[in-house]
Every structure is written in structure tokens, then in C-alpha cells.
Image (cartoon, rainbow, N blue to C red):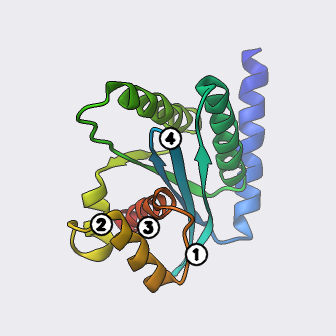
């Protein structure tokens, strides 16, 4: 069994190397805003000097959190596997939450965030926790602005529209992470 796993990993590595000789490596930055009711995410690709938004959306949560957690895990592990399989470097940034009163909300957020730490370990990719004010400061130059100002600022700078603030926060995290690694 160990020999089989070793050979499969070796084959996967060899495939990556051959595939990467003919293409420029891309870096993928994924921002995650794991709210208690809505999970926002954004995927940004950097190829040379070009940075573009690949995907961004929200995942609604409600009753049956365990089933939704498995769906979130499957979606993100499949997505990240696709990037890793083609030889891209993938980086995750998850918003660090401050919960003052509602312990139950905090537990839901921690459970959702744990999925991304698991995926990070599974694919051996870096994950950074970032405070919202830190992400705002990296991208806008100052950290004291609200969610509506973040969304409006990103819409003006990038020409994108958001369905809600969780989606814009996730994009901000992905872009701040890209700047962090540049």
C-alpha cells in the first residue's frame, strides 16, 4: 500500500513538472469570510504582472450545518485540487473573527474555519488569518472603514458588483493576501 501511494505521488509530481515546463506558473489567492450565516469567498489569479478575479460568491448556511460543512469541504478541496494539479501555487487567507457576545455564533465560525485549516494541511498550502482592518490597510492604505465603504471602494477600483458584504470582504482578503506575497 505504501509503495502504491509513493508511486502515485511520484507520478503526480512528474506530471506536474512536465506540464509546468510549457506554461507560466500562476499563483492563486483565495479569500474566505466565514460568517455565522453566510460564507463569502473570492478566488484571484496572478499570472506574471496580471491579476484577475476568477470567482467569488457566497454560500448560505442554516439548519443542517454538518451537511453544509461537508459540501463546503468538497467544493473547496476539489477547487484547490484543480489548481494544485495543474502546478499552481495556492494561498489561503481567512478572516479572523472577533466575537464579543454570541458564543454560539463563534462556535459555528470556528467550525467552518477549521475546514480551511484542514484543506491547508491536506494540500500543504499556506493559510494566513487576517483581521479585517489589516486587510483594509494593505489594500486601501487605511484600516478604519466599514463594510459598505470596502464594497464601494472595490467596485470603483475594480469595476465589480457584489451581492453582499461577505463577498466583498472575501475579495479584499484575497487581494490583500496577493499584495502580502508580492
Is 111 located above or below residue 175 in the figure? above
Dot in front, 4 or 3: 4
Residue 177 percent location from the top left of the image: 40, 61
SS type, badge 4: loop
The quadrant in which the C terminus is found is bottom left
Sequence-earlier tag: 2 or 4: 4
Compared across the picture, whether 148 is left or right of 30 comes to left
Label 2 – label 4 distance at C-alpha: 22 Å
Question: Is residue 164 or residue 12 the one in the foreground?
Answer: 164
Residue position for label 2: 136
Residue 60 percent location from the top left of the image: 60, 44
SS type, badge 3: helix
Residue position for label 3: 175
Q: Residue at x 64, y 48 (%)?
A: 80
Q: Are dots 1 and 2 in contact, CB under 8 Å?
A: no
Residue 52 has which mark?
A: 1
Sequence-earlier tag: 3 or 1: 1
Label 1 – label 2 distance at C-alpha: 19 Å
Label 1 – label 4 distance at C-alpha: 28 Å
Q: Are dots 2 and 4 in contact, CB under 8 Å?
A: no
Sequence-earlier tag: 3 or 2: 2
Q: Residue at x 70, y 55 (%)?
A: 17
Label 3 – label 1 distance at C-alpha: 10 Å
Residue 18 has which mark?
A: none
Residue 64 percent location from the top left of the image: 63, 25
Residue position for label 4: 37
Question: Is residue 25 or residue 173 the one in the foreground?
Answer: 173
Amino acid at each position: 500500500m505504501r509503495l502504491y501511494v509513493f508511486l502515485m505521488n511520484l507520478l503526480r509530481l512528474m506530471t506536474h513538472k512536465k506540464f509546468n515546463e510549457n506554461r507560466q506558473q500562476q499563483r492563486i489567492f483565495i479569500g474566505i469570510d466565514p460568517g455565522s450565516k453566510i460564507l463569502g469567498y473570492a478566488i484571484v489569479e496572478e499570472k506574471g504582472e496580471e491579476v484577475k478575479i476568477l470567482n467569488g460568491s457566497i454560500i448560505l448556511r442554516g439548519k443542517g450545518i454538518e451537511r453544509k460543512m461537508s459540501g463546503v469541504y468538497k467544493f473547496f478541496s476539489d477547487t484547490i485540487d484543480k489548481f494544485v494539479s495543474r502546478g499552481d501555487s495556492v494561498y489561503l487567507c481567512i478572516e479572523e473573527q472577533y466575537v464579543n457576545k454570541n458564543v454560539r455564533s463563534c462556535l459555528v465560525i470556528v467550525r467552518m474555519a477549521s475546514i480551511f485549516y484542514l484543506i491547508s494541511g491536506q494540500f500543504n498550502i499556506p493559510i494566513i488569518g487576517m483581521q479585517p482592518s489589516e486587510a483594509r490597510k494593505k489594500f486601501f492604505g487605511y484600516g478604519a472603514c466599514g463594510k459598505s465603504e470596502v464594497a464601494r471602494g472595490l467596485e470603483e477600483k475594480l469595476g465589480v458588483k457584489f451581492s453582499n458584504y461577505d463577498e466583498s470582504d472575501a475579495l479584499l482578503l484575497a487581494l490583500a493576501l496577493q499584495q502580502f506575497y508580492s
